[in-house]
Image: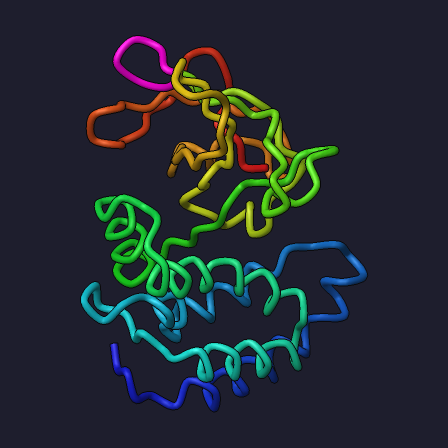
């Protein structure tokens, strides 16, 4: 992916087409699938992905310029797409995920057109950054984890591939704490607006699998 490409100019071109469809999507309450198809075709899914994984590793200034340009055409598309892009940008600055997960996200975005976002919102939770603990629980069971709870919505749910679920971890250690679990592609089978989470994952390699007792959430 070309690191020196004029991403902002290309975003302005896409935004002009987004603007033609924005009013209809607003009236109908419909998801702009075609906007994301065009963003993928133009290579924007890898905009903030590190160069070592094939991404453009765009600077903060370029990232903001792209979002500003897209927002002039369709503000909702720009806001939603930001959720995907920031995952890679913030991880470049302050790594927090196991590298095997991050590489999967990165290569998925660049090579397979996969989108990623965090599934955090719950009724009554407020902002997790303020110290709130989610009602969704991740607990050890056998050699893996069971993830159980309910989320109210997730931005980009209709087109997400990776759903990073914010959960309260209860492992018998020092007490409850917040953590991120990864249902991954299985989440695509869940409801788009909101729903129950039920996913078991292998504790050894971090590779999740579907649990028999619930649905992996897309919301």
Q: Residue at x 57, y 23 (%)?
A: 149
Q: Examine the residues drawn in magenta and state their main secondary structure.
A: strand
Q: Residue at x 77, y 56 (%)?
A: 28
Q: Quadrant of residue 89?
A: bottom left
Q: Is residue 180 left or right of residue 143?
A: right
> The C terminus appears in which quarter of the rendering?
top right
Residue furthest to the front in view is 174
Residue 152 picture location, percent across and down: 67, 35
Residue 106 picture location, percent across and down: 29, 57
Residue furthest to the right in view is 27
Magenta-drawn segment: 140-145
Q: Residue at x 63, y 36 (%)?
A: 132
Figure coloring: rainbow
Residue 209 picture location, percent across and down: 33, 25
Residue 135 picture location, percent across and down: 61, 25
Closer to the camera in the image, 98 or 42: 98
The answer, for residue 152, to whether it is visible in the render is: yes
Is 103 covered by the magenta stretch?
no
Q: Is residue 110 shown above or below 3?
A: above
Q: Is residue 212 shown above or below 162?
A: above
């Amino acid at each position: 992916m070309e690191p020196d490409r004029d991403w902002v100019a290309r975003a302005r071109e896409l935004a002009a087409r987004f603007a033609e469809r924005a009013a209809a999507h607003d009236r109908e309450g419909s998801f702009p699938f075609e906007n994301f198809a065009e963003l993928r075709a133009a290579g924007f899914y890898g905009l903030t992905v590190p160069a070592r994984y094939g991404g453009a590793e765009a600077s903060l200034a370029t990232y903001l310029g792209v979002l500003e340009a897209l927002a002039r055409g369709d503000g909702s598309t720009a806001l939603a797409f930001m959720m995907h892009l920031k995952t890679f940008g913030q991880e470049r600055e302050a790594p927090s995920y196991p590298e095997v997960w991050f590489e999967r996200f990165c290569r998925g975005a660049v090579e397979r057109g996969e989108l990623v976002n965090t599934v955090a919102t719950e009724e009554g939770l407020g902002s997790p950054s303020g110290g709130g603990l989610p009602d969704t629980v991740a607990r050890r069971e056998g050699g893996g984890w069971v993830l159980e709870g309910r989320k109210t919505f997730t931005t980009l749910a209709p087109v997400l591939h990776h759903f990073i679920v914010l959960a309260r971890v209860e492992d018998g250690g020092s007490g409850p704490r917040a953590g991120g679990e990864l249902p991954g592609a299985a989440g695509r089978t869940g409801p788009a607006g909101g729903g129950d989470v039920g996913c078991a994952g292998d504790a050894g390699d971090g590779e999740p699998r579907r649990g028999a007792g619930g649905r992996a959430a897309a919301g």
